[in-house]
Image (cartoon, helix red, strand yellow):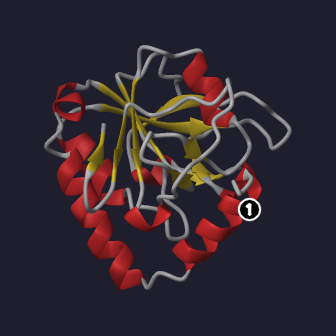
Amino acid sequence: MQMDKATIRDKILNIRSAMPESECLEKSAAILKKLDKLDAFLRAWKVGLYASTGNEVITYPLIGRAMMLDKGVAFPYIASASEQEMVFKYILSVTDLKPGPFKLLQPGANATVMEMPDVIIMPLVAFDADKNRIGHGGGYYDRYLKSHPASFKIALAYECQRVDTIEAKSHDIRPDLIITEEKIYE
């Protein structure tokens, strides 16, 4: 029997939150090493990232790497928890990130909007081998990606977040690649 998205989300979040910090650091480093070799990332001038939280794939080294490569770096910005729209806004330093809705770090309200990221690095909660994904349930990335189809989408995850099957809906947007510590799903 197919589990619903909420059940899968709860199950995988529990598995991920039980991972020791040392394991997260080791696996995140392996994932970012794979990302750093991808042409899509290396050629991109404008990169949309996310500030990892909890036991998500740790992105802070990636932020510094992208800036060192002189890429424009932007992060998701949501005006308020009741707001349905997400945009990416530029930052010049990690210190530009402040707590926003859902306790996620985001740029300030006055930061400049990145109109069309070349690459979007995105989190996920669970995925299957066909690159169907489950996020945190707000639909922010799906709505954003629908209006920015030219952006190359790369999701970062641990292999323990893979499930057999996720029933995708018509509004669900799949990443172009999912990178784990073990492989790249293309």
Q: Nearer the viewer, residue 135 or 165?
A: 165
Q: Quadrant of the C terminus?
A: top left
Label 1: element kind: helix
The residue at 22%/63% (across/down) is: 30
Query: Of the residues shown, which amino acid type is indicated by label 1?
Result: Thr
Q: Quadrant of the N terminus?
A: bottom right
154 vs 160: above or below? above
41 vs 64: above or below? above
Left or right? Give the position of 16 relative to 1: left
Is residue 110 shown to the viewer in this render?
A: no
The residue at 34%/22% (across/down) is: 118
Q: Which residue is mark 1?
A: 7
Q: Position of residue 9 (x, y in %)?
A: 67, 60
101 vs 54: above or below? above
Left or right? Give the position of 90 relative to 70: right
Q: Answer with the quarter of the image where residue 71 lies.
A: top left
Left or right? Give the position of 143 relative to 38: right
Q: Nearer the viewer, residue 89 or 166?
A: 166
Q: Nearer the viewer, residue 147 or 163?
A: 163
Q: Position of residue 58 (x, y in %)?
A: 39, 62
The extreme front residue here reads 1
The residue at 53%/72% (across/down) is: 16
Q: Position of residue 33 (x, y in %)?
A: 18, 55
The total number of labels drawn is 1
Q: Position of residue 111 (x, y in %)?
A: 55, 31
